[in-house]
Image (cartoon, rainbow, N blue to C red):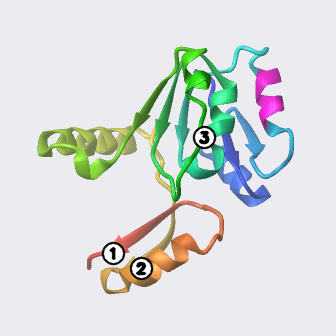
C-alpha cells in the first residue's frame, strides 16, 4: 500500500511524512489534487480517510478511484455534493463515529490499537495534553485553527 497524506503547513507535512506517508501534499496549496491525480496516473486513490469533510469532501470525490471508498471521520458543517459524482465512480462513502460502536467493537478497537503500538506500526503522536477539568479549553484550542500537529489528549489523572 502506498499512503498519501496531506497537511496545511510545512511542519504538519513533516509530521505526516515521519508518521510513514510515502507522499505528502499541502492541502492549502492550489493544484494539490491535480498532483495526486498525476501521482496515481489519473486512476485516483482507492481509499480516503477524511478528517475535514466540510472542507475537502467535494475535492475528495474528484480524486477517488472507480469503486473507491471514502471514510468520513470529521466535519464541522454542511456539505453540498452532487450524488452523480458518487454514482459515476460507484464509490462508497462511510461515516464513522466511535460513540455508535458497541462495547465489543470498542474492545476490539482498543486491542488493535494496543497491538499496533506494541508492534511499532502504530505511533500515536501526542501534541498537547489538558487535564479533564479543562476540557472546554481543550475544545477551544482544537477549534482555533492551529493546524493539527498530533492528538490532543484529556488527562483524567
Q: CA distance from mark 1 to mark 2?
A: 6 Å
Name the quadrant containing residue 45.
top right
Residue bearing mark 3: 57
C-alpha span from label 3 to label 1: 32 Å
Q: Give the percent coordinates (x, y) of residue 115.
A: 31, 39
Circle 1: element type: strand
- At label 1, counting other C-alpha atoms closer than 10 Å, the crowd grade (few under 14, some 14-19, many 20 or more) is few
> What span is colored magenta in the figure?
33-39
Magenta highlight: main SS: helix
- CA distance for labels 2 and 3: 30 Å
Against 155, residue 76 (above or below) is: above
Q: Residue at x 47, y 41 (%)?
A: 72
- The answer to whether marks 1 and 2 mark residues whose Cβ atoms lie closer than 8 Å is yes
State the residue in front, 115 or 93.
Answer: 93
- Quarter of the image with the C terminus in it: bottom left
Q: Is residue 88 magenta?
A: no
Q: Position of residue 59 (x, y in %)?
A: 69, 37
Closer to us: mark 3 or mark 1?
3
Amino acid at each position: 500500500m502506498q499512503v498519501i497524506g496531506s497537511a496545511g503547513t510545512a511542519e504538519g507535512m513533516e509530521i505526516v511524512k515521519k508518521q510513514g506517508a510515502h507522499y505528502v501534499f499541502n492541502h492549502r496549496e492550489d493544484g494539490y489534487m491535480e498532483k495526486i491525480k498525476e501521482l496515481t496516473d489519473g486512476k485516483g486513490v482507492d481509499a480516503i480517510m477524511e478528517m475535514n469533510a466540510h472542507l475537502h469532501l467535494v475535492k475528495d470525490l474528484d480524486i477517488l478511484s472507480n469503486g473507491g471508498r471514502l471514510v468520513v471521520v470529521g466535519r464541522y458543517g454542511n456539505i453540498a455534493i452532487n450524488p452523480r459524482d458518487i454514482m459515476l465512480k460507484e464509490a462508497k462513502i462511510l461515516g464513522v463515529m466511535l460513540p455508535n460502536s458497541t462495547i465489543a467493537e470498542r474492545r476490539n478497537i482498543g486491542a488493535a490499537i494496543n497491538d499496533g503500538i506494541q508492534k511499532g506500526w502504530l505511533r500515536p503522536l501526542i501534541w498537547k495534553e489538558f487535564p479533564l477539568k479543562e476540557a472546554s479549553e481543550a475544545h477551544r484550542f482544537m477549534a482555533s485553527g492551529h493546524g493539527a500537529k498530533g492528538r490532543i489528549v484529556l488527562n483524567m489523572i
